[in-house]
Image (cartoon, grey):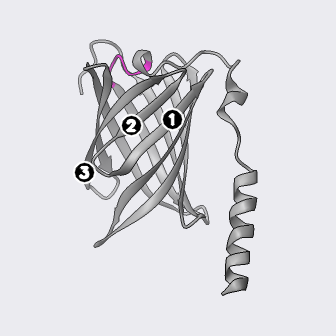
């Protein structure tokens, strides 16, 4: 048992050493504003890859937003490559100085995020349904604004500190009159 705890401590220590501080991107342009980016309908395309690189799911997402009581509400509608559908509604709350918190039905507790320059870094736990089971995954989300209409997201998914896969997602703002 002592060896196991020592090994676990070592693995978690090494994993935390590789973490980049979002402040590193403070001077990067264009500056990311969640309210501005999601002020129009957004389409997104992505995939989930296992830690060995195998793509196991592809998906598209339609996102519409609205402002409500000082919050930014993102209504996401997913269509997966296997034909399944999912809906996630985020309630994002600005907390000042680039900090945000977020809630959704399948998020455990509160997501915490920080924006610096063109970058948003989110961390949260997500209840992920797989077949007939649900797994609580730790999500480490990095979003990068490339231009005023394009956002790239890369997420590391882990369980007990071990990465089990990654999500890559590309967001594109639609023209003001685009229909969902």
Determine whether 57 is above or below 143 in the image. below
The disc, 1 or 2, on the residue closer to the chain's N-terminal end is 2
Determine whether 128 is above or below 76 in the image. below
Residue at the extreme front: 2
Residue assigned mark 1: 113
Residue assigned mark 2: 102
Horizontal and vertical percent position of residue 169 = 49, 41
How crowded is the residue under tag 3: few (<14 C-alpha within 10 Å), some, or many (20+)?
Answer: few
Labelled disc at residue 92: none
The residue range painted magenta reads: 37-41
The disc, 3 or 2, on the residue closer to the chain's N-terminal end is 3
Q: Main secondary structure of the magenta part?
A: loop
How crowded is the residue under tag 1: few (<14 C-alpha within 10 Å), some, or many (20+)?
Answer: many
Q: Label 3's element?
A: strand
- Tell which of 82 and 115 is nearer to you: 115
Label 3–label 2 contact, CB within 8 A = no
Choose mark 3 or mark 1, whichever is in front: 1
Give the Cα separation between the discs numbered 1 and 2.
8 Å
Which residue is located at x 34 percent, y 39 percent? Answer: 61
39 within the magenta span: yes
Left/right placement of residue 160 relative to residue 60 reads right
Label 3–label 1 contact, CB within 8 A = no
- Tell which of 92 and 79 is nearer to you: 92
Q: Label 2's element?
A: strand
């Amino acid at each position: 048992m002592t060896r196991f705890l020592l090994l676990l401590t070592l693995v978690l220590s090494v994993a935390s050493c590789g973490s980049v501080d979002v402040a590193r991107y403070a001077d990067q342009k264009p500056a990311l504003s969640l309210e501005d980016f999601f002020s129009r309908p957004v389409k997104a395309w992505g995939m989930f890859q296992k830690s060995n690189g195998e793509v196991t799911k592809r998906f598209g997402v339609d996102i519409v937003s609205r402002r409500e009581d000082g919050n930014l509400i993102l209504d996401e509608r997913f269509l997966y490559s296997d034909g399944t559908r999912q809906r996630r509604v985020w309630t994002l709350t600005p907390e000042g100085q680039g900090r945000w918190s977020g809630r959704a039905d399948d998020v455990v507790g509160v997501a915490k995020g920080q924006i610096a320059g063109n970058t948003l870094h989110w961390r949260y736990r997500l209840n992920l349904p797989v077949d007939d089971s649900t797994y609580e995954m730790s999500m480490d989300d990095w979003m990068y604004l490339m231009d005023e209409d394009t956002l790239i997201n890369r997420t590391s998914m882990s369980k007990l500190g071990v990465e089990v896969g990654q999500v890559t997602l590309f967001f594109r703002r639609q023209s003001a009159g685009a229909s969902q």
